[in-house]
């Protein structure tokens, strides 16, 4: 996506952005499929909203920064609540790749119900690990699952992980952004889950 080929002026000439709703609306038609008044709703396979302007495709969450601040984020944009199509200004923040790794949802393949916690058949114990700055750190292994979960949560708190990290993805655009802003990573708190049989 050619972010250097669009200016804030050009963006505001063709689209209106409502920071309260996160919705972009065409104010100038660039093709028959995008008439004036139509909401930008082209969804990528990853769940992000995109807009085609002057033959270039842009992610709406990144356009929001250009619209509001006049520049694109240098690195990444985080949807604080994890809902990739929720482009409300309060839900977006500029972050580094490393910071983005501290606000990831629970992977669908996770069997323990907790990020970084898994059962080792080899060791016959629960193991907690955490990845920070590209390096995986061993936290604890124990037969006591709750002790391992607690150790992982403590590590997340100490390392500044976002409170949403490890939670299940919500489809509710209003989910869990009330205590967040673009410059802080609130302390995490996490759900519990049953032990496997």
Image: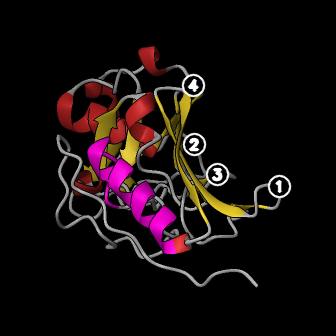
Q: Which residue is mark 1?
A: 122
Q: Gap between marks 3 and 4, in whole Å?
A: 15 Å
Q: Which residue is mark 2?
A: 31
Position of 182 relative to 47 (above/below): above
- The dot on residue 1 is 4
Are the residues at dot 3 and dot 1 in contact (C-beta closer than 8 Å)? no
Q: Residues within 10 Å of mark 3 (few under 14, many from 20)?
A: few
Q: Secondary structure at mark 3?
A: loop
Q: Gap between marks 2 and 3, in whole Å?
A: 24 Å
Q: Residue 68, located in which quarter of the rendered image?
A: top left
Are the residues at dot 2 and dot 3 in contact (C-beta closer than 8 Å)? no
User: What residue is rendered at 37% in x and 48% in y?
Assistant: 155
Residue 32 at x, y = what percent? 60, 49
Residue 197 at x, y = what percent? 76, 85
Position of 72 relative to 182 (above/below): above
Q: Residues within 10 Å of mark 1 (few under 14, many from 20)?
A: few
Considering only order in the chain, which callout, 1 or 3, is on the residue closer to the N terminus? Answer: 3
Judge depth for marks 3 and 1 and give the one in front: 1
Position of 194 with respect to 23 (left or right) is: right
Q: Residue 13, located in which quarter of the rendered image?
A: top left
User: What residue is rendered at 46% in x and 62% in y?
Assistant: 83
Asked if residue 117 can be seen in this view, the reply is yes
Asked if residue 12 can be seen in this view, the reply is no
Q: Gap between marks 3 and 1, in whole Å?
A: 35 Å
Q: Residues within 10 Å of mark 2 (few under 14, many from 20)?
A: few
Q: Gap between marks 4 and 1, in whole Å?
A: 45 Å
Q: Which residue is mark 3?
A: 46
Region rendered in magenta: 146-163
User: What residue is rendered at 24% in x and 52% in y?
Assistant: 89
Overall secondary structure of the magenta section: helix
Q: Residue 111, located in which quarter of the rendered image?
A: bottom right
Considering only order in the chain, which callout, 4 or 2, is on the residue closer to the N terminus? Answer: 4
């Amino acid at each position: 996506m050619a972010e250097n080929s669009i200016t804030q002026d050009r963006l505001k000439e063709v689209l209106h952005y409502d920071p309260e709703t996160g919705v972009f609306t065409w104010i100038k038609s660039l093709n028959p499929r995008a008439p004036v008044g139509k909401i930008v709703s082209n969804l990528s396979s990853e769940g992000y909203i995109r807009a085609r302007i002057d033959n270039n495709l842009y992610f709406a969450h990144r356009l929001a920064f250009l619209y509001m601040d006049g520049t694109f984020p240098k690195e990444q944009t985080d949807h604080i609540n994890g809902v990739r199509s929720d482009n409300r200004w309060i839900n977006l923040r500029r972050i580094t790749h490393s910071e983005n790794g501290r606000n990831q949802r629970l992977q669908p393949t996770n069997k323990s119900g907790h990020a970084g916690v898994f059962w080792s058949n080899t060791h016959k114990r629960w193991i907690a690990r955490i990845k920070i700055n590209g390096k995986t750190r061993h936290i604890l292994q124990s037969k006591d699952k709750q002790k391992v979960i607690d150790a992982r949560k403590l590590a997340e708190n100490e390392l500044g992980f976002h409170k949403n990290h490890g939670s299940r993805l919500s489809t509710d655009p209003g989910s869990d952004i009330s205590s967040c802003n673009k410059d802080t990573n609130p302390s995490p708190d996490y759900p519990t889950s049953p032990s496997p049989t």
